[in-house]
Image: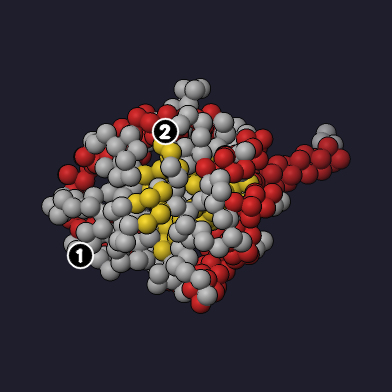
Amino acid sequence: MQNPVRNIFILLAAFLLLISCKGTSQTVTSGTLPVDKNATKETIALYKNLFRLKEKGYMFGHQDALAYGVEWKYEAGRSDIKDVTGDYPAVYGWDLGRIENREDKDLDGVPFAKMREFMKQVYDRGGVNTVSWHVNNPLSGKDAWDNAPGTVVSVLPGGSQHEKYKGWMDNAAEFLLSLKGSDGKPIPILYRPYHEFTGDWFWWCKNTTTPEQFKELWKFTVTYFQSKGVHNLIYVYNTSNENVTTKADFMGYYPGDEWVDVVSFDIYQGGDGAKRDKFITDIKKLVSIITDVAKEHNKLSAIAETGYEAVPDAKWWTGTLAEAIGKQQISYVLVWRNHGWNEWMKPPRMHYYAPYKGQVSEKDFTDFYKKDNTLFQSDVTKEKLYR
């Protein structure tokens, strides 16, 4: 004889199990996993932990932070940020430009062998590596800034440069697969391909291609790297501030949620006065856009490049950058490299974006460092982002 009370308990248990499974399914499909379904354990952990971390604040990043600074190069353990604060940045930017030709150094002169070692140091101490690629123009053989129309079409399947471009990507894949920590695990990378595409200066920019072609290029890139066994990438969709005034502008070339992990933009301040005002207005507008997009599509968001060359404003860090970002929950903000004197620029000048000892904004940067919602290496090390 059946026990009615027991049956009720069985039905209740089944109902609770159904709710639990449904909740699990929602979590798995919500976007808190990277788009690479075969991503490494550490890559998955980093992506999930970055969602958690943004509740505490945004990470500060610096391009080529360990390689060189103003008036120094390749000094072990050094960075201009560490000289000023006693701490490293949380995010470290690198570039693959020239890997396509298997050159020894990237386009900024950093030997790839040294870059590999720097990235290992970052991973070992719990920091985050991000990579862009100023890839040469495969159609003309010139650099990334040779932006004649037709290059994107030429590298797509069936295009005249498709096989050449696959060879270039093979070279990049080989380097990416060589990135290992002291634990022997592949180092997770925030990979930012075809950056600033809403501008008009690179061969992949929107003035040279259509949304459909760009999306196809993006999907081909993700798929091809995965086919080569590269499963340590978190993919960052990145616009310029140029030609982006609405969410529709930002999303016009978006390849889809199944292809993107992070949404971001690049923006630089070009001067004081009205130019400063515009910079602040534009950042507030764009951060609002990417914050909305990130929430709607369950993605991370970031200011992937920014800065004010030579930082002539003594209060720029707290009075301009932090003010513009406000309390918005982005994942990170990265300033460009500290090259120092650059005789190749027109006109020749000091070219740097982070403070160094004695620089006019040094004191303000230490105040920026001490803010509750700015995160540096010591902050993220505690978070054990790869576990």
View extreme (front): residue: 358
Q: Is residue 143 above or below residue 120?
A: below
- Mark nearer the N terminus (1 vs 2): 2
Distance between the alpha carbons at the discs numbered 1 and 2: 39 Å
Residue 77 pos. (x, y %): 51, 31
Q: Percent x, y for residue 107?
A: 30, 45
Residue occupying image coordinates x 37% and y 66%: 198
Picture residue at 21% right of the left edge, 46% below the top: 165
Is 45 placed above or below 55 here? above
Q: Please say whether residue 312 is visible from this viewpoint.
A: yes
Q: Which residue is mark 2?
A: 74
The type of residue carrying mark 2 is Tyr
Asked whether, in this view, residue 121 is left or right of residue 170, the answer is right
Count neighbours of disc 2 (C-alpha within 10 A) and say few if under 14, some if 14 to 19, many if 20 or more: few
Q: Position of residue 259 (x, y in %)?
A: 42, 52
The residue under the point 34% across, 54% down is: 194
The foreground one among 251 and 1 is 251
Q: Residue furthest top?
A: 183
Q: Position of residue 386 (x, y in %)?
A: 57, 34
State the residue in front, 258 or 342: 342
**Quarter in which the N terminus is drawn:** top right
Comparing 197 with 293, the one in front is 197
Q: Say what amino acid the circle numbered 1 marks.
A: Pro
Residue drawn 57% across and 40% down?
83
